[in-house]
Amino acid sequence: DHVDAMADGILGAVPGPLAVAGFSLGGIVAMALVRRAPGRVARLALLNPTARPDPQERQAIRHRQIAEAEAGRLGEMVAAELLPRYFGGPVADSLPRAVLDMALSLGPAVFRTQSRALMSRADARAWLPQVRVPTLVLAAEHDALCSVAIHREIADAIPGARMEIIPGCGHMAPMEAPAAVTNALNRWLAEP
């Protein structure tokens, strides 16, 4: 339930140099990986994350959402509060249903753990200028959780980072625009 512990778990489980791509919370963990083991990360792709710490008002919301999930209302809470913020435009009904199904399959305990990890995240902005690997910052045009401006802040802080914006989609860009995300990641992997 802590971002640094997640990063340490990856570092302990996967030997050698890493090409790290992280989406949302995974992007926050990816930034922690670089901070904790800069010599192990050979390249970095950050998809829809934030480098900012969790604001106090957001933490209060997370505590309430954890209580809702633990009281047996995970599905209702995700459908009412999270799904409307995840997608950036008209999407097939199957996409929100898939996200809801994922949340339900993981259950309240994982929701609690991930929420606590999000609350524990450090302010990465101060050390991002120390990142010295090929970095892609991938934003979504209509991301209601992590705006294009938040992504620009990350890209501007990392020397040589390349930022791309996926048009017409929201936070769940890998689901809304999988071909565009895959193409951006392929370009990133092909960089020298």
Image (spheres, grey):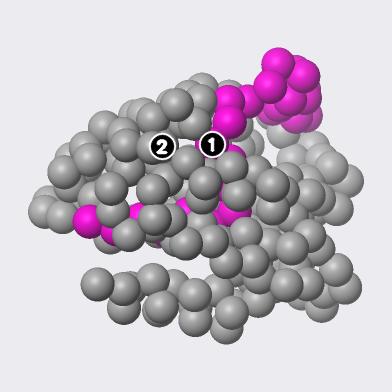
Element assignment for label 1: loop
Point out the image quarter for the C terminus.
bottom left
Residue at the image position 62 percent from the left and 59 percent from the top:
139
Q: Residue 35 lies in magenta, yes or no?
A: no
In the drawing, what numbered circle is on residue 88? none
**Image-based side of 167 in relation to 129, left or right:** right
Q: Residues within 10 Å of mark 1 (few under 14, many from 20)?
A: many
Q: Is residue 75 visible?
A: no
What's under tag 1, amino acid-wise?
Ala
Residue topped by disc 2: 128
Res. 71 image quadrant:
top right
What's under tag 2, amino acid-wise?
Leu
Name the residue nearer the viewer: 159 or 87.
Answer: 159
Q: Which residues are magenta?
A: 42-68
Q: Is residue 31 visible?
A: yes
In the rendered image, residue 184, in percent from the top left (x then y), is placed at 49, 75
Which comes sooner in the sequence, label 1 or label 2?
1
From this view, report whether residue 111 is shown above or below residue 55: below
Which marked residue is nearer to the observer: mark 1 or mark 2?
A: 2
In the rendered image, residue 70, in percent from the top left (x then y), is placed at 69, 28
Name the residue nearer the viewer: 175 or 88.
Answer: 88
Res. 50 image quadrant:
top right
Element assignment for label 2: helix
Residue topped by disc 1: 51
Q: Residues within 10 Å of mark 2 (few under 14, many from 20)?
A: many
Residue placed furthest toward the left: 16
